[in-house]
Image (cartoon, rainbow, N blue to C red):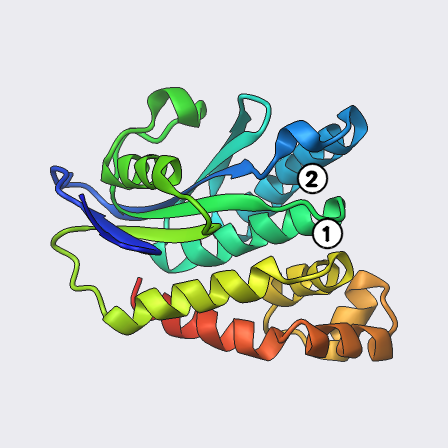
Amino acid sequence: MTSLNSIETANDATYSLSTGGVVTGDIVNSSALSDAEHQACLQQIEQTITILQETFHAQGDVFRGDEFQVFVPSPKEALRCAVLLRLTLMKTVKGTDARVSVGIGGYKQIESELRKTAKGEAFQLSGRALKNMKEERLKISFPTAHNINPSDELLVRYLDSILTGLSEKQAEVLFPRLLYPDLTQDALSDKTGIHRRSLASRLQRANATLILDTLAVLETGL
């Protein structure tokens, strides 16, 4: 495997079917969570997977107590789903985060039991990269045939750094902002029940505009 830090490639056989995205992740330092905190995190991940199913036609599972995997049919939406899964944990329990690995590639045999039946390059890339992750908490992996833009690697590291520094309250407002990017702040305030002034202040401190712009640039290459 050729590694470019936050973006990786692999020499896997290309499947002749569709190309999609797979997000594989785990909770950082899950053993330090109390039973109640751990259960709350798992419940929130499951709820977010349901939202991703409704919004992006994704499909996902939670397994082994602290790991999860989500298949996203559109590669362009896989990175946003990965960020939303991180924000889910960050807004649920203070100081909690996840490592998330996004694999972009071919896939086949997507059925109801994702973990047992899904096969393909995207799943291999995502799972393999997660095992190799060290300090970083966000990574994207492509097949070797993919023409990688070196600036994308830097943008992934930049996005990872901003996300890692978010507070619980900032993650709480960023989650709906990324999920509903077209809503006005008034509409987002009504949807979340957070006062508009407080919402705007938290989004500004969280660098929401920079995060959205960085995602938009990266998504054009997926």
Q: Quadrant of residue 4?
A: bottom left
At horizontal 47% and vertical 45% (from top left) the residue drawn is: 100
Q: Looking at numbered disc 2 in the image, what kind of residue is underneath it?
A: Gln
Is 75 positioned to the left or the right of 201 in the image? Answer: left
At horizontal 38% and vertical 48% (from top left) the residue drawn is: 102
Rounded to the nearest whole Å, what is the CA distance between mark 2 and mark 1? 10 Å
Location of residue 50 in the rendering, given as x and y in whole percent from the top left corner:
60, 40
Is 185 positioned to the left or the right of 145 in the image? Answer: right
Location of residue 176 in the rendering, given as x and y in whole percent from the top left corner:
67, 62
The image shows residue 93, relative to residue 87, as above or below, that is above
Q: Are dots 2 and 1 in contact, CB under 8 Å?
A: yes
At horizontal 68% and vertical 50% (from top left) the residue drawn is: 90
> Which is nearer the eye, 95 or 148?
95
Q: Quadrant of residue 5?
A: bottom left
At horizontal 50% and vertical 44% (from top left) the residue drawn is: 99
**If the image is split into quadrants, where does the N terminus sit?**
top left
Other residues around mark 1 within 10 Å, as few (<14) / some (14–19) / many (≥20): many
- The residue carrying mark 1 is 91
Q: Quadrant of residue 106?
A: top left
Q: Point out which mark residue 112 bears.
A: none
- The residue carrying mark 2 is 44
Q: Looking at numbered disc 1 in the image, what kind of residue is underneath it?
A: Lys
**If the image is split into quadrants, where does the C terminus sit?**
bottom left
Q: Secondary structure at mark 1?
A: helix
